[in-house]
Image: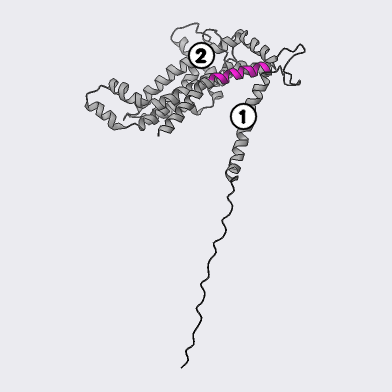
Amino acid sequence: MATTTFPLSKSRTVIPPMPRRRRKWAPYLFLALPLALYFTWIIGPSIATAVLAATNWNGISRLRFADIKGNLYLIQNVQWLLGNGNFWTALGDNIKWLVFLLLIPTSMGLAMAMIFNGKMPGSRLFKVAFYSPLVLATVVTGLMWASMYNPDIGLLNSLLRLIGISSPPNWLGDRGLALWSIIFAAAWRQVGYVMILYLAGLKGLDISLVEAATVDGATFWQRFRHVIFPLLAPVTVVVLVISVIDSLRAFDLVSIMTSGGPDHSSEVLANFMYISAFNNYEMGHAAIIALVLFLLMACFIVPYLIYIARTEMEY
């Protein structure tokens, strides 16, 4: 009997699809919009400020970098700045802001963080109360403190009259008190922020190191000095850098409360720059002040960025 044989079916070879060509430009497409915004709002204005510093532009005229005799406006702007007494007053006032904010709010914020980090009754309420000034807009803070400093109906002078002081000081009208009155308002706003930063740092500490120091018989001050505070070094660096930046770019409170007066006694660099640009229409002078502010901030920000880069590389 003949048997029927069927031919073996040939197995089909599946050809894999050709891989799509990788589009190397795809990641840059995602970065295009953020980079465009960053250039528009940060890099572009910075370059424009550097250009304006070499001109005498008043906001309307053409940009010129030298006068008819060929004298460069950049050199003239630098000479004007170095010979302007208001500039040195503003720089000195910024240094006073810097020293005060580095010492008072930092130490008070750290002290309150140490107090509220423990099991203290009502600590949450106190945290909210001390942090709430930071929630307010700076303009609101300035208006509120200006009302409190009012020489006739202000809260401070009303309290001083109640305790028998018949002629209380004019806080914002006195050359010797105006700047310190504004700095006190700025410190009142800064303390809560520093407290929150240190509280976050305390929550991340290795508690076993503190317990080991306690077992070894270390006092509270010894534990704080040799264990807790060294471990808070990264937070301290952040607090110091933020305080420096806030001190150098101080503008809102000064503009709202005194506008730099009386007689430039509370002037700061940012307010001096604003008045030169938008009151006197001297854009070249304002730009050279902005460059000075930029260089001052860079002296603190660049070492901080180097420190952050080295710390990340170690981890």
In contact (CB < 8 Å): disc 2 and disc 1: no
**Which residue does the numbered mark 1 point to in the structure image?**
43
> Would you say residue 129 sits in the magenta stretch?
no
Identify which residue, 293 or 67, lies in the foreground.
Answer: 67
Residue 263 appears in the rendering: no
Mark carried by residue 95: 2
Residue 189 in picture, x, y percent from top left: 48, 23
Q: Is residue 163 left or right of residue 172?
A: left
Q: Label 1: state its secondary structure.
A: helix
Farthest-out residue, bottom: 1
Q: Amino acid at mark 2?
A: Ile
> Would you say residue 286 sits in the magenta stretch?
yes
Q: Label 2: state its secondary structure.
A: helix
Q: Amino acid at mark 1?
A: Ile
Identify which residue, 83 or 111, lies in the foreground.
Answer: 83
Which quadrant does the C terminus fall into?
top left
What secondary structure characterizes most of the magenta part? helix
| Sequence-first tag of 2 and 1 | 1
Question: Above or below — where is 182 with respect to 4?
Answer: above
Mark 2 or mark 1, which is nearer to you?
1
Residue 202 in picture, x, y percent from top left: 36, 29
Question: Residue visible at 62% across and 25% down?
Answer: 46
Instruction: Identify the image quadrant of residue 53.
Output: top right
* Label 1, residues with CA under 10 Å away: few <14, some 14-19, many ≥20: some
Residue 67 appears in the rendering: yes
Identify which residue, 145 or 308, lies in the foreground.
Answer: 308
Instruction: Identify the image quadrant of residue 280.
Output: top right
The residue segment tinted magenta is: 284-296
Residue 234 in picture, x, y percent from top left: 41, 27
